[in-house]
């Protein structure tokens, strides 16, 4: 495994961290297809688009904004899936349904249960090499068994290097607003949805935001996620 600090330094030296960015306005749509129709159709060709080598994603949340830098070389299959989910609004108006103190912040079940239902079972193959370690601030996909990554992701709020040997490859890291991630409400712990391995997420899948807002009203909200492009 590559030393993650050396990899990050090399990325910075190569100019991979964009200092000024603007929104990627390419979100959304084939000419005759609405954004919602695209979300409900995982077979649409827009979901196969490859990501650039690096890009930023800004998350607007009920507790502030944070920015993730994605480095495709760390986990290209995961990076592609993540960018396309962001570009087409999958994560917008959802909830951080699992925040475990001294462990992770997790999200990725859509607020609209019809959208979640469309993506259940839409797996991607594993990125078999863990090129960057699960240190504080990195982001990776959650999964149950090999080759079962779909839409749920997590941010490490502490160093969770033990996840490296379990095959969880980070595809990016928080480069702005880690203090915002730290503020995301964690009072419910595992009870508000749990993980894909041990938790019961059936009620979230069935009702989406309606269930979470009714039963766990203090959960923080993911308002919008936007891909940002470097400015020339």
Image (spheres, rainbow, N blue to C red):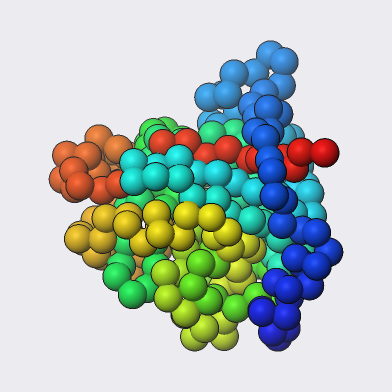
Instruction: Please tell me whether residue 175 is drawn above or below residue 229 in the rendered image.
Output: below
On the question of residue 143 being in view, the answer is no
Q: Position of residue 45 (x, y in %)?
A: 74, 35
Instruction: Locate residue 27: give its quadrant.
Output: top right
**Quarter holding the C terminus?**
top right
Q: Left or right of 73: which side holds 205?
A: left
Question: Which residue is at a point 69% across and 14% down the rendered structure image?
Answer: 32
Instruction: Locate residue 5: give its quadrant.
Output: bottom right
Nearer to us in this view, 100 or 177? 177
Question: Which residue is at a point 17% across and 39% down the rendered structure image?
Answer: 214
On the question of residue 92 being in view, the answer is yes
Nearer to us in this view, 112 or 120? 112
Question: Which residue is at a point 57% across and 81% down the rendered structure image?
Answer: 164
Q: Position of residue 160 (x, y in %)?
A: 47, 80
Instruction: Please tell me whether residue 193 is drawn above or below residue 115 in the rendered image.
Output: below
Q: Left or right of 170: which side holds 196?
A: left
Question: Which residue is at a point 51% across and 67% down the rendered structure image?
Answer: 137
Q: Position of residue 2 (x, y in %)?
A: 72, 83
Instruction: Locate residue 127: give its quadrant.
Output: bottom right
Q: Left or right of 214: which side holds 170?
A: right
Instruction: Please tell me whether residue 80 is drawn above or below residue 207 in the rendered image.
Output: below
Q: Position of residue 161 (x, y in %)?
A: 52, 83
Instruction: Please tell me whether residue 120 is drawn above or below residue 46 in the rendered image.
Output: below
Q: Left or right of 208: which side holds 150?
A: right
Nearer to us in this view, 219 or 148? 219
Nearer to us in this view, 80 or 148? 80
**Quarter holding the N terminus?**
bottom right
């Amino acid at each position: 495994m590559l030393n993650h600090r050396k990899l990050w330094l090399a990325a910075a030296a190569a100019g991979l961290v964009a200092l000024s960015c603007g929104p990627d306005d390419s979100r959304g749509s084939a000419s005759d297809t609405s954004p919602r129709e695209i979300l409900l159709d995982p077979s649409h060709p827009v979901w196969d688009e490859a990501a650039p080598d690096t890009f930023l994603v800004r998350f607007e949340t009920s507790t502030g904004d944070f920015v993730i830098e994605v480095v495709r070389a760390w986990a290209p299959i995961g990076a592609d899936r993540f960018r396309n989910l962001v570009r087409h609004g999958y994560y917008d108006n959802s909830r951080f349904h699992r925040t475990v103190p001294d462990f992770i912040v997790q999200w990725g079940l859509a607020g609209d249960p019809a959208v979640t239902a469309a993506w259940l079972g839409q797996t991607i193959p594993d990125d078999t090499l863990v090129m960057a370690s699960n240190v504080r601030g990195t982001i990776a996909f959650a999964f149950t068994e090999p080759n079962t990554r779909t839409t749920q992701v997590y941010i490490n709020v502490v160093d969770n290097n033990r996840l490296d040997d379990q095959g969880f490859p980070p595809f990016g890291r928080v480069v702005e607003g880690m203090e915002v991630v730290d503020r995301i409400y964690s009072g419910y712990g595992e009870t508000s949805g749990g993980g894909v391995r041990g938790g019961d997420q059936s009620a979230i899948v069935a009702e989406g935001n309606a269930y979470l807002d009714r039963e766990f009203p203090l959960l923080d909200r993911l308002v919008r996620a936007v891909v940002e492009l470097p400015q020339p």
